Amino acid sequence: MIKRKENNKNFAFIFARGGSKGVKRKNIRTFAGKSLLHYTIAFIKKINQIDNIFVSTDDEEIANIAQENDAVLIKRPRDISCDNSSEWMAWKHSVEWVLKNYGNFHKFVSLPVTAPLRIKEDVERCIAAHSDINEFVITITESKHNPWF
């Protein structure tokens, strides 16, 4: 990975809980012999603007997959790993952990494991769009169906 000055580092974060109400163990479900987590980490490694990859989890199997794929593990406390836990709390915990253990960084890039159909160029455009003026970049897709049904 490209190494930048501390204040220009871009870090990718993956948030993968072990529990799930819907699809059980969804973050480590396999497709073509590899877990969704593996594919997300491999995808991030192809983005030159990313300096390090962190995986926040409360689950030992997810932690093992993360470390086997050269991601840095952030052990997430159980109290912010529940079905009703705010993702913002996991983000806050991870940022505080990274600042303490890796120092300052410039850009926070969060890529969900359960959205594997992303395009590298889209992520690179988001990283480029983020600036001192544009503090937050988020991508969305218009729903074809009402999500409440």
Image (tube, helix red, strand yellow):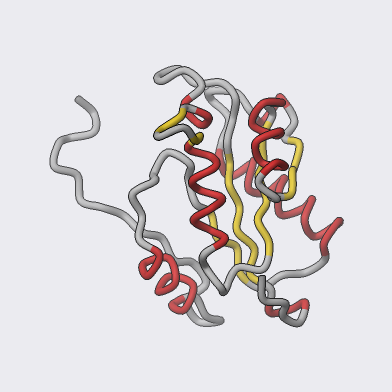
- Horizontal and vertical percent position of residue 136: 49, 67
* Residue 145 placement, left or right of 29: left
For residue 9, above or below residue 71: below
Q: How many marks?
A: 0
| Quadrant of the image containing the C terminus | top left
Dividing the picture into quadrants, the one containing residue 107 is bottom right
* Residue 83 placement, left or right of 146: right
Dividing the picture into quadrants, the one containing residue 56 is top right
The structure residue drawn at horizontal position 74% and vertical position 43%, both measured from the top left corner, is: 73
- Horizontal and vertical percent position of residue 131: 52, 80
The structure residue drawn at horizontal position 64% and vertical position 31%, both measured from the top left corner, is: 62
For residue 53, above or below residue 57: below
* Residue 119 placement, left or right of 16: left
For residue 110, above or below residue 127: above
Q: Nearer the viewer, residue 69 or 3?
A: 69
The structure residue drawn at horizontal position 72% and vertical position 42%, both measured from the top left corner, is: 67
| Quadrant of the image containing the N terminus | bottom right
- Horizontal and vertical percent position of residue 25: 51, 22
* Residue 119 placement, left or right of 128: left
Q: Nearer the viewer, residue 148 or 20?
A: 20
The structure residue drawn at horizontal position 79% and vertical position 50%, both measured from the top left corner, is: 97
Q: Nearer the viewer, residue 143 or 65?
A: 65
Q: Nearer the viewer, residue 143 or 114?
A: 114
The residue most toward the right is 101
For residue 118, above or below residue 59: below
- Horizontal and vertical percent position of residue 42: 53, 53
The residue most toward the front is 33
